[in-house]
Image: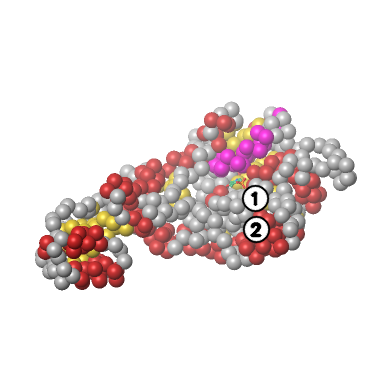
Amino acid sequence: MLKDIQVARSCTIRDALARLDRTGHGLLLLVSAEGCFERTVTDGDLRRLMLGNASLESTLTQLPQRASVTVKVGSYTRQQALALMGQHSIHHIPVLDDSGSVAGLLERKELDEQILLSTPHLGEFEREFVEEAFRTNWIAPLGPHVDAFERELAAEVGVKHAAAVSSGTAAIHLALRLLDVGPGDRVFCSALTFVATANPILYQGAEPVFIDSEPFSWNMSPLALERALAESKAQGRLPKAVIVVSLYGQSADMDPLLELCDAYGVPVVEDSAESLGASYKQRPSGSMGRMGIFSFNGNKIITTSGGGMLVSDDESLIKKARFLATQAREPVPHYEHTTVGYNYRMSNILAGVGRGQLRVLKDRVQARRRVFERYRDGLKHVTAIEWMDEPAWSYSNRWLSTGIIRSERTRVTSQDLMQRLMAERIEARPVWKPMQLQPVFAQAAYYSHEPQHSVSAHLFESGFCLPSGSNMTEAQQDRVIAVLSDLFAKG
Ligand SMILES: *Cc1c(COP(=O)(O)O)cnc(C)c1O
C-alpha cells in the first residue's frame, strides 16, 4: 500500500490522479530519486498545477517544494499524532525512518480507534426477545421474560431460585434487608472491591468492617476473617452477614471462608457481580453462600444495560425479595403496605436482553479467557508483570485481565502504565481502591491479611486492569501487547 502512494517527480499528473483515485487515501507521497520523502501531494495540489499551465501529461517537476508535517518512527504516541493532525487540520502524517524514507503513514481514522476496557457484546437472540416483548406489549416491570430469565439464570448457576432486579447493588441491598441488617449491626465485607458492595451496608444504617485480601486469589483472606470474627465474638458483636466478593471473575477461596462463617453462625452473601460463569471446585460462583448476587451492568461479562439478580436455594428469601422489590405491596387490591419496600424489579424488556445474553455466556467466558491468555503469552518476556493467578480450585471468567507490577524488577509504575496506554488511546484502570482507604469509610474497622501486611493496599498501588472485552479483536490485543512491550523495554 505504501508503495502505491509514493510517486517521483517524473510521474505525470494523469498517472498521479489515477493513483489518487485507485488508492483512495486522498494523498500521495512525493519522494526524491534517492527515496527520501519530499512532501505530500493532494488532489488540490494537482488541480492548482492544471489551473496553471500544466496538462495531464506534464510531470510533477513543477510542484513547489513545501515542508509537510512528518514524524519519526517510534517518536510519538497516538495522542500526540492526533494532536498534530488537529493542529494542522490534516488527516495523514507520513512516518519517516532515520534516512528520511517513508516507513509508514498515520491515518486519523485509524489512530482515532479507541480500545475500551469492557464493552457490551450482544449476541443474536437479544433482539428477538426484545421484539417479542414489544409485540406482546409486555413493556412493564415484570413479565414473562423476567420469569424466564430468573429460571434460566438459576439453572445456569445451579441454584433453586432467583429474583431479577434493577441492579447488582439493589440485589445486595435486598440481601442485607432479608438478613435483617439494621442500625447498630455490623456487616463484614471484602475490602478490595467496587464501592457498590459496601454502600448497601450504609443504606441499612449498619457498620461495615472491611476484611483484607489474601495474595493468591486477591479475594477475602481467611486469616483476616478469622481474627475479625474472633474479636467480634469477644466483644459480643458478631456481624449479621459477611459479604464475600469474587473479584475480576475469580471466586474467593470459599471453603475456609464458609467454614469460619458456619462456625460462628454468620450467613454469607456472595457478591458475584463480576464472576458470573466462574467456578470454585466445580461449584458456580454465586451459588455457595446463603444468597448470591450478580450484576448485568454494561461493563460486566453479560449485560442488560443495567440489572441484577439475587439468588438462593431458600425459596422464602427469594419470594420475600420479590415482595420488597415491588414496594412491599401486600397481595390485596387496595395497596396495603406493612413494611418499607423498594422499586427494584427488572423490566420485561431488559430481561429479554438478559435471556439472549445468557445464551452466549459460555462463549463470553471463553473469549475473555483467551484475551487474558494472549496478554500473558504476548508479554511473557516482561518479568516485571505478575498476572492475577488462577489457583487450582478456581475457574475464572477473567472478566478483566489484571496484574501487578513487581517494583523491584522495573522502574515502570502502574501510573506510568496507565498513562502510556491512555496516550495510545487504550483504556486501562487501576485495581479497585480498597474500601479502608476510601474517605467515605474512614471510620470503618479493617482487618489486614497479616497484622503488618495489607494485601489490598499493595494490589491497589501496583495493580492494573487491561482492556478485556469479549469482542476485542486480536489486532486490538496486539496493540496493547506492543505498547506494553515497548514501555517495559524502555523502563
Ligand atoms: C458492578 C458491581 C456491583 C454492582 O452492580 P450494579 O449492577 O452496577 O449495581 C457490585 N459489586 C461488584 C464487585 C461489582 O463489580
User: Which amino acid does the dot numbered 2 rest on?
Assistant: Gly
In x, y percent, where is residue 382?
Answer: 35, 54
Front residue of this view, candidates 118 and 44: 44
Task: Give the left or right position of residue 262, taking residue 423 as reference.
Answer: right
Question: Could you say which is closer to the camera, residue 305 or residue 238?
Answer: 305
Q: Which mark is residue 354?
A: 2
Marks 1/2 in contact by CB < 8 Å: the verdict is yes
Q: Residue at x 29, y 62 (%)?
A: 26
Q: Residue at x 68, y 56 (%)?
A: 349
Total marks drawn? 2
Residue 254: where, in percent of width, then height?
A: 63, 50
Q: Which residues are magenta?
A: 184-203
Name which residue lies at 64% across and 59% down.
Answer: 353
Query: Residue 151: where, in percent of width, then height?
Result: 73, 60
Q: How is the image coloured?
A: secondary structure
Measured in 3D between alpha carbons, the distance from the residue under mark 1 to the one under mark 2, in whole angstroms, is: 9 Å
